[in-house]
Image (spheres, rainbow, N blue to C red):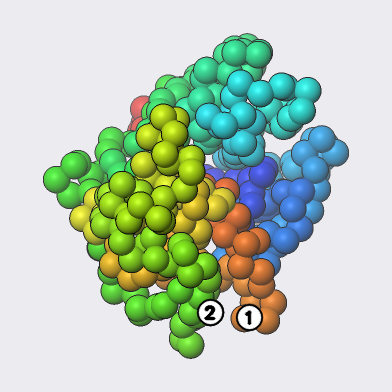
Amino acid sequence: MMEQPISAVDLFCGIGGLSYGLKQAGIKIKAGFDFDNKCKYAYETNCKAPFIHEDITNIKKEDIVKFYKEEDIKILLGCAPCQPFSTYTLNGDKQKDQRWQLLYEFTRLIKETQPDIISMENVPNLLNFKKEPVFENFVNELKEEGYFVWHQIVYSPDYGIPQKRKRLILLASKKGKITLINPTHTKENYVTVREAIGQLEALDSGESSSKDFIHKASKLSDKNLQRLKQSVQGGSWKDWDEDLKLECHKKESGKTYGSVYGRMKWDEPSPTMTTFCTGIGNGRFGHPEQDRAISLREAGILQSFPLEYKFASNSENFKFTQVSKQIGNAVPPRLGEVIGLSIIKHLEEIEDGKK
């Protein structure tokens, strides 16, 4: 058991998925920074830490170090927005999207604050960013600063997350070699969609639960409702009547969009949650049985947010698309917990080695 206090500051904190996970692991969360002030309520309510509304380019050393005590083991978390490294934008014009440079801002703050431990999470395609070796530069600069660096692409179901999400995880420590803990699940006991959301109240398209306003499904058009009614679990638009098929499906290129408007499978982890995961036109986000897209609450649970996580203060004070985007952008809390447990295990091993 660590006697020295462990404290973390979370840059790009969003609604708190990563912070909440580390908190569940037993790490003290001192503050979260993010440029989107709409994340403030969810972050502060669930993570019990102050939310600082600021763009990372304006954050200085003193803004961060004031949250640490001298005796703390200091952790700095930095999961920069992943859209510039996604499959959709990887081959785009970098002049149109400068967000990939946020990783360099994170590097700047690491150099200025010199935390003991660093964690970063992003999309695997960050490794393939051809316009500039962003990730390679980041790793090399960490090593120059005296950090032991570990990174790997992690398959979320291996750690009990009910979602087929692959993420690039990096851990770095000045205290010695650090790695992620071993997987906690195998294909035989992956958490499925049924196990995650099968117990939730049934809803119709556009309906909201009277017991939980976040358990709300988007309203489908009549045509999309007909399409979903003809869809089967894991199927595609090929299951529909001809008059329901879109023109793009009839082209050769349309064959690659088999998951769009599709239903999830009950007995597998879900597809990767995105910012559009509560609509059916952007992926396999149809409920396995009910004639609707998954609800906001279901999307949150599939991201491994607990059922009681508060995304908004009340039913009058939230916007559906805003919360959907926040959930899709979040780091799964369970992944945050795994990162936290890995950090604690690392520190305990270092401590034991000194005895």
Relative to 313, residue 6 above or below: above
The answer to which of 225 and 300 lies nearer the viewer is 225
Left or right placement of residue 111 versus residue 166 in this view: right
Q: Residue furthest front?
A: 243
Label 1 close to label 2 by CB (< 8 Å)? yes
Q: Give the total of numbered labels.
A: 2
**SS under mark 1:** loop
For the point 47% across and 64% down, the residue is 223
Asked where in the image residue 156 lies, by quadrant, the reply is: top left
- Among the 4 quarters of the image, the one containing residue 165: top left
* Residue 234 picture location, percent across and down: 27, 50
Q: Amino acid at mark 2?
A: Phe
In the rendered structure, find residue 243 and report the number of the disc placed on it.
Answer: none
Q: Earlier in the sequence, mark 1 or mark 2?
A: 2
Residue that mark 2 sits on: 213
Q: Which mark is residue 314?
A: 1
**Residue shown at 35%/79% (left/top)?**
201
Residue 143 located left or right of residue 100: left
Q: CA distance from mark 1 to mark 2?
A: 8 Å
Residue located at (25% from left, 44% from top): 184
Residue 349 screen position, x and y as percent: 36, 33
At 73% from the left and 26% from the top, the residue drawn is 101
Q: Nearer the viewer, residue 285 or 249?
A: 249
Characterize the local packing of mark 1: few (<14), some (14-19) or many (20 or more) Cα atoms within 10 angstroms.
few
Question: How many C-alpha atoms fall within 10 Å of the one at disc 2: few (<14), some, or many (≥20)?
Answer: some
Task: Give coordinates of residue 162: x percent, y percent.
Answer: 33, 52
Q: In this view of the protein, can residue 243 be seen by the observer? A: yes
Front label number (1 vs 2) = 2
255 or 284: nearer the eye?
255
